[in-house]
Image: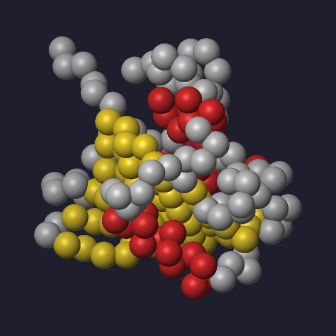
Amino acid sequence: MKLTSPSVFRECAKLRCIYCSQVFPESPSYDGTGASVGQALSKWLHTPRADGRPKVLKCVGLSQIEKHLEDLKMAFISAESPVSYVICLDFGIGFKYGGQPFEWDNARTRERMTFRYIKHIYSLGVWLLRRGPIGWDESEWSESEKRAQRGGDRCLCRQCHLNEQRKRN
């Protein structure tokens, strides 16, 4: 799927939360002509908010998550400027994710990236990926983490819902 304007996320300066179904940030981060939804999403995610708070992304119905996580880890390791975000990965019934929690530090940006399991309800595996300052204040981050787990506050604006429909042969 191609966006009519891949830069749509960048043009929504106050967009804070995105809820995605079957879409995940893809490398390379790009929102120019011909960019995929995943590339534009990655560009949005890696563009810091003006207020410094973390962006929030909730993803459901994902496949090939291992490759996507490796891409995010590589982007983090090679980053030269900081950005903060929280991604909640909600794996559906019947999907088994065999990954392991991790924690990485980037000395150049003074950031930490963590990936941890947060709950298991009715065969749903929920994991949280968090990128932010090494000395983050847990109380500040807890609000963003809760929003990511809920999929954003449905009553608030400044959020977007994506559902990429794939063609079936």
Residue 150 shows in the view: yes
Judging depth in this view, the residue of 5 and 76 nearest the camera is: 5
As drawn, 100 above or below 76: below
Q: Relative to 12, is 153 on the left or the right? A: left
Q: Report x, y in % for residue 3.
A: 47, 21
Judging depth in this view, the residue of 41 and 158 nearest the camera is: 158
As drawn, 91 above or below 110: above
Query: Would you identify the image quadrant in which residue 99 lies?
Result: bottom left
Q: Relative to 40, is 66 on the left or the right? A: left
Name the image quarter holding the N terminus. Answer: top left
Judging depth in this view, the residue of 91 and 7 nearest the camera is: 7
Write the residue at 16% across / 55% down: 94
Write the residue at 18% across / 14% down: 169
Write the residue at 80% across / 68% down: 110
Query: Would you identify the image quadrant in which residue 21 lies?
Result: top left
Query: Would you identify the image quadrant in which residue 141 lies?
Result: bottom right
Q: Which scheme is used to colour this image of the protein?
A: secondary structure
As drawn, 89 above or below 19: below
Q: Relative to 33, is 99 on the left or the right? A: left
Q: Report x, y in % for residue 70.
A: 55, 49
Write the residue at 30% across / 75% down: 119
Number of numbered markers? 0
Q: Report x, y in % for residue 66.
A: 44, 50
Residue 66 shows in the view: no
Q: Relative to 96, is 49 on the left or the right? A: right
